[in-house]
């Protein structure tokens, strides 16, 4: 059995420390009694209570969650369809252009994407608000879903689909009953990735949000210009907790689904 060298161990430790120690410090100081975030004055949960009474933050959080759920769901549907066409569609007229348009947001600077969408919305006379943020987040997160689902479809055992077709299932029934359940872990992972990207986005939302719809990253960015407050630490701690729980639950569900599918595939091959 190969063991990690001391260099790899130290490098991995330093890397994780660089990523997670600031988060740990933020969580600790969210329970600080003092209003000064750099001075520890004792343990207290009062800033969480203050946060729950802050209407501006609560409204921004609601808009952010609503936009993330809607945009990630639409992006998952469109991204899965795009991935299926790219992997299973073979050669067709405009395939290169279609593929380039799908993957362009991966390498396009967010400032360019946000500015382009802003000009588009102004050109068609669409008022900026929740709808424009949803459209913008769907546009750039769909490509991430497509990449995740495409990687699963490439390694998909098509003999299972052929067996379903030989047994009399239609193409739609085969996709719904065979293909979709097998690629479900990738679809769920794509949805979670799109949700996280939408939840965290600041640049594109800054271009496409209006006065009636302010997302949480925009609100936090505006607030920290006047200095970091304990309420922001409390809010960030809650976001870390929510995202961590979501990742753990999704990982467990995906792993359970994958084990179930592998067992069913082995039983199908034996029969």
Image (cartoon, rainbow, N blue to C red):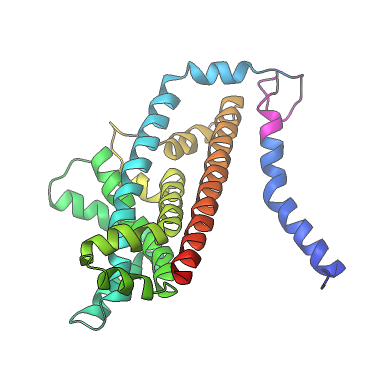
The residue sitting at 34% across, 62% down in the picture is 178
At a point 67% along the width and 33% down the height, the residue shown is 27
Region rendered in magenta? 27-42
Q: Nearer the viewer, residue 176 or 264?
A: 264
Q: Is residue 107 left or right of residue 131?
A: right
Q: Main secondary structure of the magenta part?
A: loop
Question: Which of 53/109 is in front?
Answer: 53
Note whether residue 158 is visible: no
Q: Is residue 32 magenta?
A: yes
Q: Quadrant of residue 163?
A: bottom left
Q: Quadrant of residue 112?
A: bottom left
State the image coordinates of residue 12 (x, y, percent, origin top left): 75, 61
Q: Quadrant of the C terminus?
A: bottom left
Quadrant into which the N terminus falls: bottom right
Taking the spot 82% from the left edge, 73% from the top edge, the residue there is: 2
Q: Nearer the viewer, residue 170 or 188?
A: 170
Image spot of residue 107 (x, y percent): 41, 68
Q: Outermost residue, right direction? A: 6
Whether 238 is drawn above or below 186: the answer is above
In the image, is residue 79 part of the stretch drawn in magenta? no
Residue sitting nearer the eye, 27 or 165 = 165
Residue at x-position 74% and y-position 51% = 17
x, y percent for residue 184: 41, 56
State whether residue 6 appears in this view.
Answer: yes
**Residue 118 appears at what percent x and percent y?**
25, 51
The image quadrant of residue 78 is bottom left
Residue sticking out furthest to the left: 124
| Count of labels in the image | 0
Q: Relative to residue 121, is residue 168 depicted above or below?
A: below
């Amino acid at each position: 059995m190969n063991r990690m060298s001391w260099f790899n161990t130290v490098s991995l430790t330093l890397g994780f420390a660089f990523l997670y120690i600031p988060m740990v410090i933020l969580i600790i100081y969210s329970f600080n009694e003092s209003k000064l975030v750099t001075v520890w004055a004792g343990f207290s949960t009062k800033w969480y209570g203050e946060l729950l009474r802050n209407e501006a933050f609560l409204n921004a959080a609601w808009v952010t969650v609503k936009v993330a759920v809607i945009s990630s769901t639409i992006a998952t549907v469109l991204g899965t369809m795009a991935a299926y066409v790219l992997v299973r569609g073979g050669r067709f007229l405009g395939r290169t252009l279609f593929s380039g348009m799908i993957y362009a947001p991966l390498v396009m600077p967010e400032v360019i994407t946000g500015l382009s969408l802003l000009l588009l919305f102004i050109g068609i006379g669409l008022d900026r608000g929740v709808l424009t943020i949803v459209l913008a987040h769907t546009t750039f997160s769909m490509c991430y879903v497509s990449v995740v689902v495409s990687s699963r479809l490439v390694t998909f055992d098509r003999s299972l689909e052929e067996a379903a077709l030989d047994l009399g299932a239609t193409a739609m029934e085969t996709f719904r009953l065979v293909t979709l359940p097998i690629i479900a872990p990738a679809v769920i992972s794509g949805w979670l990735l799109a949700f996280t990207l939408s939840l965290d986005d600041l640049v594109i939302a800054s271009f496409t949000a209006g006065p009636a719809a302010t997302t949480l990253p925009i609100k936090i960015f505006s607030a920290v210009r006047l200095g970091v407050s304990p309420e922001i630490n409390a809010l960030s701690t809650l976001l870390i907790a929510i995202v961590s729980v979501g990742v753990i639950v999704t990982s467990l569900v995906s792993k359970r689904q994958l084990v179930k599918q592998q067992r069913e595939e082995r039983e199908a091959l034996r029969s």
